[in-house]
Amino acid sequence: MAHSKQALKRARQGETRRIRNKAKMTRVKSAIKALLALCQAGDMAKAKAMLPKVCKAIDKAAQTHVIHKNTASRNKSLVGRAVAALK
């Protein structure tokens, strides 16, 4: 465990950020999973309506460095292709 005041504060900050990042990552994963489930079910109208929301969640995670920008791009491509394949 940390001994100095500075190290204790950094430990507190790190824990706060870990929880915040975990929430953002959970939000992204859940959104992707829900959209892919809609695509699997063949519900094109709902999937098309949900696509911008999923992309926004992915972009926000990348913007705050929770995920890498290339990972965000890959995930957006994945969901975009899934929705496009419904046609």
Image: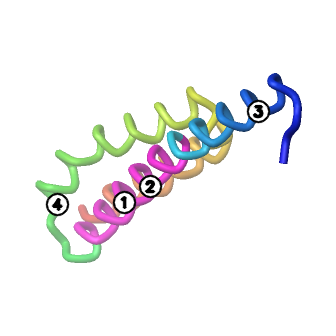
Q: CA distance from mark 4 to mark 3?
A: 51 Å
Label 1 neighbourhood size at 10 Å, few (<14), some (14-19), many (20+)?
A: few
Tag 1: residue type? Ser
Q: Amino acid at mark 4?
A: Met
> Which one is earlier in the sequence, the residue at label 4 or at label 2?
2
Give the dominant element type of the magenta stretch: helix, strand or loop.
helix
- Mark 3 and mark 2 lie on one chain; the one further toward the N terminus is 3
Determine the CA span between mark 1 and mark 2: 6 Å
Q: CA distance from mark 3 to mark 2?
A: 27 Å
Which sits earlier in the primary sequence, circle 1 or circle 4? 1
Disc assigned to residue 30: 1
Under circle 1, the secondary element is: helix
31 in the magenta segment? yes
Q: Which residue is mark 4?
A: 44
The residue tagged 3 is: 8
Tags 1 and 2 touching, CB below 8 Å: yes
Q: Secondary structure at mark 2?
A: helix
**Which residue is found at the position 46% from the left and 41% from the top?**
58
Which residue corresponds to the image point at 58% horizontal and 42% vertical from the top-left? 73
Q: Which residues are magenta?
A: 21-39
Q: Quadrant of residue 17?
A: top right
Estimate how packed mark 2 is, as few (under 14), some (14 to 19) or many (20 or more) residues with alpha carbons within 10 Å: few
SS at badge 3: helix
Left/right of residue 6 with respect to residue 73 in the rendered view: right
Which quadrant of the view contains residue 45?
A: bottom left
Q: Position of residue 71 (x, y in %)?
A: 64, 47
Dot 1 and dot 4 residues touching (CB under 8 Å): no
